[in-house]
Image: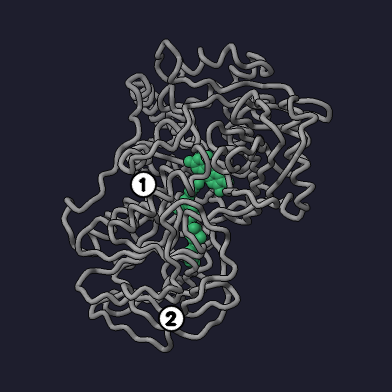
Amino acid sequence: MAASSDADGEAVVTAVGAEGDAVERASPAPRKKSSTSPPRARSKPKAKAASAAPPENGSKNNNKKVVVIGGGWSGFGACLHLSRTKGVDVVLLDAAASPGTGLMKSKGGRDVEPGTRGFWYDYPNINALTDALGISPFTDYLTSGFWEKDATSAKLITEAPVFSAERLKLPTIIGQYFSTAPRFYNLPLADRISLIPFLKDWLLFNKDDDTFETYDLMTSREMFRRSGLSVNAMNKFISPTLAVGLFAPPEDLSAAVVLELLDFYALRTTASFDVRWSKGPIAKSIFGPLVAKIESNGGKIQGSSFVSRVETKDDGTVELEVLVGSKDKAKKQVVKADAVVFATSIKGMKSIVASSPALGSRPEFARINSLRSIDAIATKLWFEGSIPTRFPANVVIGDDVGRLGMSAHTYFAIPGGDDDEEGPGEDVTAISSDFYGSTALLPYSDEEIVDIALDSITKCDRAFKDAKLVDTAVLRFPGAVTHFSPGSHKNRPSQRTSHPSLFIAGDYVKGRLNGALGLSQERAYVSGLHAANLVLTERLGLGDGAKAEILETADDELHVKVARELAVGLDARRIRD
Ligand SMILES: Cc1cc2nc3c(=O)[nH]c(=O)nc-3n(C[C@H](O)[C@H](O)[C@H](O)COP(=O)(O)OP(=O)(O)OC[C@H]3O[C@@H](n4cnc5c(N)ncnc54)[C@H](O)[C@@H]3O)c2cc1C
């Protein structure tokens, strides 16, 4: 989530050692700590703020210098692999004071992280990363509840079981059908049957580029309507699923991306929908150890560094204008590099393109300006005492939620994570509640947003009815999430650009990557590894041996492959007839 800075500071020119290592300084680099730094994570080690003026920026060696812009999953993926490559000096610049590891504070001073992140069953590269780091940050796979609430109460529509725990391992589709059949409490059989015809779209949408583009131009609501989905199934099942998976309603989502989401998160294998959670903030449980690993490899993580402009030079190198330090006192620094990976999210990339004619004149960067992003609000509520919830993860729909312009919102009570966060001996129950596509809610006061979350929690879990609220946090993130709107595919960039030194990573890039699709931490992380591979092989001329290993997600099961071939064959015949 990008921070922004418009500070106009004293110019400081520092080379991140492009060829020749020229280091030009108009004035000493700032040494003061950022005064507006958000509270830092307790995890070690902490990222070095650029204001410490690391002498490494002008290191005297012949190493190639790569700058990664953005400290999220994609930037850390790129930085990790580049940091372990001999002959490469990598620095990650991020606008946040403590990239990846910073936490915000509640009104009462408790730690809080924006958004609750689920880790789905088929995240092989993130799983390999946590194994390599020697950490066990995840809960077990946990069940989720889907609720519909009205003015007085809430009823359970369905619950998502842990499919991988089912004793009988059935093929995909058949397995999900038998596991969920007894668990749809408030969605009649006729509505569930109306879900079946859209499976034809799932089998066909990816058959070739033209078909994919056709689906991309269509809204997912239109696709489901054409397939005969009932209004009830749309409103009570598909809409909430898409609100949670892609943060937007079906009428505002590309049918192609919705089919990708359902493919990756629900249909590829029976267990695709199984999800587990980070025990506590990922800033502490995953990014803390990851930052430590990158730094121990010799990579540099530099916070409070907002990249405001990019220039390309005739010799193929790149010069970045970076605003270093807190917004009101930022100093301008010029950083040179042999290659740059943009890992900034759409919002961050648009702001860099807008101020960089060298990028704006290239069609693939200019087209990013047509991409949209979605607003999100994350809340956390602390209640006195230990209060049990029926499900650790909950999706809430209903007219109240719809009136606020959203198809659904969520609340979570993830077990095992908050002990350390609340401090020893504190007997509280922490619930996070996230609102996606929440533009209409942005102007609401914190108290009003907390009331909306409370209304859902108390109606779904009656044990909270008389619970005493002891602390709250409300965090707003305008434009933080990629919006896969209809027709957006043609404007999404590839990871390779028309400039040989510039590469792009993030969940919005085009391409199949390792088969992780939709909005996902796995996809963002893999896009970072892939960007690093492109830098090493295509820009720096290293062989394939220098590439990071990227693990594939599950392949289609045999019966799906056969069904796909049949569907494609029949479809071709239909068109010829
Ligand atoms: C509320 C929420 C809940 C989510 N839940 C899940 C989930 O349950 N499971 C799941 O798999 N995925 C989830 N996602 C999606 C997933 O988190 C994202 O797809 C992924 O984190 C994107 O990573 P990224 O590195 O591409 O971008 P980001 O994490 O957005 O990182 C971009 C970074 O770039 C920095 N930046 C931007 N502009 C500049 C600049 N000019 N100069 C310097 N730095 C800059 C920002 O400070 C930021 O740190 C969720 C997302 C959100 C917002």
Q: Residues within 10 Å of mark 2 (few under 14, many from 20)?
A: many
Tell me what residue is drawn at x 75 percent, y 44 percent: 450
Q: In this view, does 478 lie to the left or right of 138?
A: right
Instruction: Locate the N terminus by quadrant.
Output: bottom right
Q: Which of the numbered marks, if any, corresponds to residue 228? A: none
Q: Is residue 87 left or right of residue 465?
A: left
Q: In this view, does 24 lie above or below 242?
A: below
Residue 404 figure quarter: top right
Does label 1 or label 2 sit earlier along the sequence?
2
Q: In this view, does 478 lie to the left or right of 520?
A: right
Q: Is residue 491 visible?
A: no
Q: Residues within 10 Å of mark 1 (few under 14, many from 20)?
A: many
Q: Residue 316, how many percent across, how many down?
A: 28, 74
Tell me what residue is drawn at x 50 percent, y 76 percent: 32
Instruction: Locate the C terminus by quadrant.
Output: top left
Q: Residue 262, how many percent across, how many down?
A: 49, 32
Residue 575 figure quarter: top left
In whole angstroms, how far apart are the C-alphas of marks 1 and 2?
A: 34 Å
Q: Residue 326, how many percent across, how many down?
A: 56, 72
Q: Could you tell me the amino acid type at mark 2?
A: Ala
**Which of the pair 472/450 is nearer the observer?**
472
**Which of the pair 71/443 is nearer the observer?**
71
Q: Which of the numbered marks, if any, corresponds to residue 29? A: 2
Farthest residue to the right: give it.
152
**Which of the pair 285/226 is nearer the observer?**
285
Q: Which of the numbered marks, if any, corresponds to residue 526? A: 1
Q: In this view, does 171 lie above or below 496?
A: above
Tell me what residue is drawn at x 48 percent, y 27 percent: 141
Q: Is residue 471 above or below residue 417?
A: below
Q: Residue 564, how many percent across, how many down?
A: 38, 26
Q: Could you tell me the amino acid type at mark 1?
A: Val
